[in-house]
Amino acid sequence: MSNWHVNTEGSQRVRDADPLRVAVVVGSTREGRFGTTIAGWFVGQLRRHDTLEVEIVDTLQVALPHAFGAVTDHPSRAETAEKLSRADAFVVVTPEYNHSYPGALKNLIDEHHVEWQAKPVGFVSYGGISGGLRAVEHLRPVFAELHAVTIRDTVSFANPWRRFDDAGELTEPTDAVTATKALLKQLTWWGEALRAARAANPYGA
């Protein structure tokens, strides 16, 4: 299993004003997953911005039921619901498995409902030659059904295993940094606009 290069214990507030709260969802639970390296790099980029507050939701650390609607009172589920509920925006880090996204990620999404509503969702994907983009396109209608707004621009990594060094840093970061800036510009616009709208008129689906 890849090692985290960021602190996954809770959130980091980087200024005393009212930052946009971004929950980064790590979708892979596979042994030896590369998702933590991808997420670690991306969170590092987020934490360069003092207008953002970053929190990690790692699917591997959540005790999800094997069947939809099954009851479990594991503390990790309540903690996850709280993290998602207080987030103003989300970024899902997903691999591509068989032209789609992981089952554990779908389980996490399905176990929550109002937490996603009227909030923007961005995507960071990785995989083979497609860079995980087919997984992203499958996720868009799922979040639309949950009344979330998906961000057009993505950050994608084709064959990322060759692009990161042992410290979890990109050997050639220019394109990824540019894509991240575009994603964050859109995510921030939607996050701030929808946060203000929810405050003025609570969303009801």
Image (cartoon, rainbow, N blue to C red):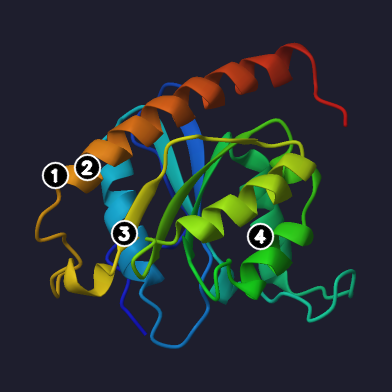
Q: Which circle, 3 or 4, is nearer the viewer?
A: 3
Quarter placement of the N terminus: bottom left
- Identify the residue shown where x is 63% and y is 46%: 140
CA separation, marks 3 and 4?
30 Å
Query: Quick check: can you spot residue 52?
Result: yes
Circle 3: residue type: Phe
Choose the circle earlier in sequence order: 3 or 2. Answer: 3
| Residue occupied by mark 3 | 157
Query: Is residue 105 toward the left or the right of residue 28 in the image?
Result: right
Measured as percent of width and height from the top left, residue 186 is found at 44, 26
Choose the circle earlier in sequence order: 3 or 4. Answer: 4
Q: Which circle, 3 or 2, is nearer the viewer?
A: 3
Circle 1: residue type: Thr
- Kindly identify which numbered label has been placed on residue 177: 2
Compared with residue 94, is residue 70 higher up or lower down, i.e. above or below? below
- Kindly identify which numbered label has been placed on residue 174: 1
Circle 2: residue type: Val
* Whether label 3 touches label 1, CB < 8 Å: no
Query: Is residue 129 toward the left or the right of residue 200 in the image?
Result: left
Measured as percent of width and height from the top left, residue 17 is found at 42, 21
Label 1 Cα crowd, 10 Å radius (few <14 / some 14-19 / many 20+)? few
Compared with residue 8, is residue 121 higher up or lower down, i.e. above or below? above
CA separation, marks 3 and 2?
12 Å
Query: Is residue 66 toward the left or the right of residue 191 in the image?
Result: right
Label 4 Cα crowd, 10 Å radius (few <14 / some 14-19 / many 20+)? some
Q: Secondary structure at mark 2?
A: helix
CA separation, marks 3 and 1?
12 Å
Measured as percent of width and height from the top left, residue 189 is found at 48, 20
Q: Secondary structure at mark 1?
A: helix
